Image: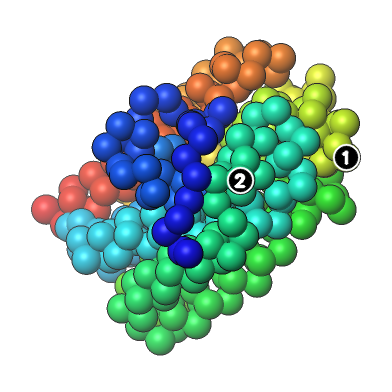
Amino acid sequence: MLFSTKDTGPVHDAVKQHWVDTHLPSWARPYARLARWERPIGWWLLLWPCWWSAALAAIAAGHPWPNPWHLLLFLIGAVAMRGAGCTYNDLVDENIDRQVERTRSRPIPAGQISRKQAKVFLVVQALVGFFVLIQFNSFAIGLGIASLAVVAIYPFMKRVTDWPQLFLGLAFSWGALMGWAAEFGSLAWPAVFLYLGGICWTIGYDTIYAHQDKEDDALVGVRSTARLFGARTKPALVALYLGATALFALAAAFADAGPAAFVGIAAGAAHLLWQVLVLDIDDPDQCLKLFRSNTRYGWIVFAGLAADALIASA
């Protein structure tokens, strides 16, 4: 049966005593853990390029703020599609997850939920995402459907390349194109620069995240930029974060943004520099903390863009 699950306790790397464990009925908990509802950082990271792009489009269009309806749709879509992506990833990675300490307690390898149940849940979440997508114009709908190709291949990249984080960036930064397309029904250089910058940012933060698993990854043959960079991780992060900052600044410039947007980008760059300076790649707990701090980075950049739109229209 679809809703017949076995709750064998929280996932090892999940937030403890979260509302998923304390308020949801026992049959629903494995589904919530599969979608990572207790870890909002994932959908925040998927959402930020969407909201940045919507704010950048507002600046270019002369609006005082990003379209609120678009922001709400992107929020719902990010939660749904992040959950669908995690479900798909766990289906693909079941055998690998069983061999990694941090992931072997996830719902599928732990036997909390069957593969059939996970596939049905995947379809339900994807349908929510599709319903959100069709609220936009036809160009944005086609662009959103095109993203599925990148999403589909991402889980396999850790088996064939040292750069799976690049493919995560291609998928997670797609919203940088969507926000602009939702406003204008086309693409332009500001959205492209924002997308490229988002890729650099994603490679950086997910490299930090991947350092949690580098020992287990080496044993099971999983590849990552964390293993590739190794002791050179900090210089690599400096290059990636500088690239992201420069590309975000180009996006703002091509959208004719004012000073507030650049102040936000600069303040965000200071936050990224802090990440690099304090990073200890051999401290998994700190790596996770720094990874999660990118939610604050997203707010900083968005606040600058949104403030700029408001100031320019005054």
- The residues tagged by marks 2 and 1 sit, at their Cα atoms, a distance apart of 23 Å
Q: Nearer the viewer, residue 266 or 47?
A: 47
The residue sitting at 80% across, 25% down in the picture is 215
Q: What residue type is disc 1 on? A: Gly
Disc with the residue nearer the chain's start (2 vs 1): 2
The residue carrying pointer 1 sits among few (fewer than 14), some (14 to 19) or many (20 or more) residues within 10 Å by Cα, namely few
**Residue at which label 1 appears:** 221
- The answer to whether residue 21 is seen in the rendering is yes
Closer to the camera, 43 or 71? 43
Which of label 2 and label 1 is nearer to you?
2
Q: Identify whether 24 is placed above or below 61.
A: above
Residue drawn at the location 42% of the way across and 25% of the way down? 16
| Side of 202 relative to 295 (left or right) | right
Left/right placement of residue 37 relative to residue 282 reads left
Please indicate whether residue 296 sits to the left or right of residue 166 in the image. left
Q: Tell me residue 28's x, y (percent).
A: 38, 49
Residue 278 lies in quadrant: top right
Residue 186, position as x, y percentages in the image:
44, 79
Q: Secondary structure at mark 1?
A: loop
Q: Residue at x 66, y 66 (%)?
A: 152
